[in-house]
Amino acid sequence: MTEQKIGAKDVAALRQQTGAGMMDSKRALEEANGDAEKAVEILRVKMGSKLGKLADREASEGTVQSYIHANGKVGVLVEIDCNTDFVATNADFVAFAKDVALHIAGSPQTRFVSEDEVPQDVRDAEARVFEQQAADKPENVRPRIVEGQLKKWLGEVVLLNQVHVNADKHDGKTIEQLRGDLSAKTGENVVIRRFTRFAVGE
């Protein structure tokens, strides 16, 4: 059986349906060879009664936190949402928001929260550049080179894909893994809604 290519939209749809994390959703889809119904079954076994409860709850509460670098040259505002005002004022939740703001300050290439937000035309433009760069390589390996470069680029521009800049403090976890941990700990749908990074002269 040929391996089904898992798209970001498929992963997003499964996350929305189940409340599972991005990597869990992707792994389930890969295991199910792209079959969404089978992927839900796999996640049901893994997550049990938690499945669906988080994603169905609207994240209408939250916090806006900031980080200003010591030299006053870089600043970040980030909005992170949850389900209740109780969690919105929780110390762990606020600390997570501050940690995300700090990470974005140290990651100037970050442009999008998730892969779902990356416009197709922007992806296509990057892919064309990588195709041109791989033009001198054997034709049969070019697609793999382009795919690898695209994945690396997404890791640079997509917040959830990135390992937190303070890797020692966070055990080398990605922002998505940290978000998932907090969601599991609080029992709420934690959503990084948006961010803005300011840098003097940019």
Image (tube, rainbow, N blue to C red):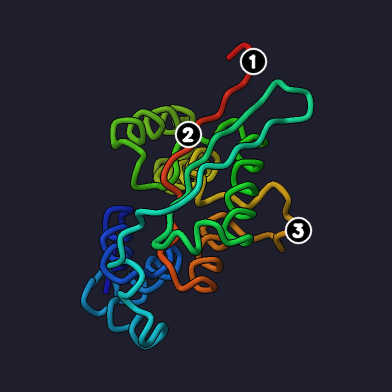
Residue 9, percent across and down?
27, 53
* Image vertical order of residue 87 relative to residue 106, above or below: below
Question: What amino acid type should be assigned to the residue bearing mark 1?
Answer: Val
Q: Nearer the viewer, residue 191 or 168?
A: 191
Distance Cα–Cα, label 3 vs label 1: 28 Å
> Residue 46: image x %, image y %?
41, 84
Residue located 50% across and 57% down the image: 88
Q: Earlier in the sequence, mark 3 or mark 1?
A: 3
Which is more toward the observer, 187 or 120? 187
The C terminus, quarter of image: top right
Q: Position of residue 177 (x, y in %)?
A: 55, 63
Residue 156, above or below 109: below
Q: In this rendering, would 89 be left or right of 194?
A: right
Residue pointed to by mark 3: 169
Name which of mark 3 and mark 2 comes first in the sequence.
2
Image position of 104 (left or right of 59): right
Question: What residue is disc 2 on?
Answer: 111
Q: Nearer the viewer, residue 12 or 93?
A: 93
Residue that label 1 marks: 200
The structure residue drawn at horizontal position 52% and vertical position 40%, both measured from the top left corner, is 78
Tell me: 72 left or right of 105.
Answer: right
Residue 197 placement (x, y as % from top left): 55, 29
Q: State the CA–CA distance, disc 3 to disc 2.
A: 24 Å
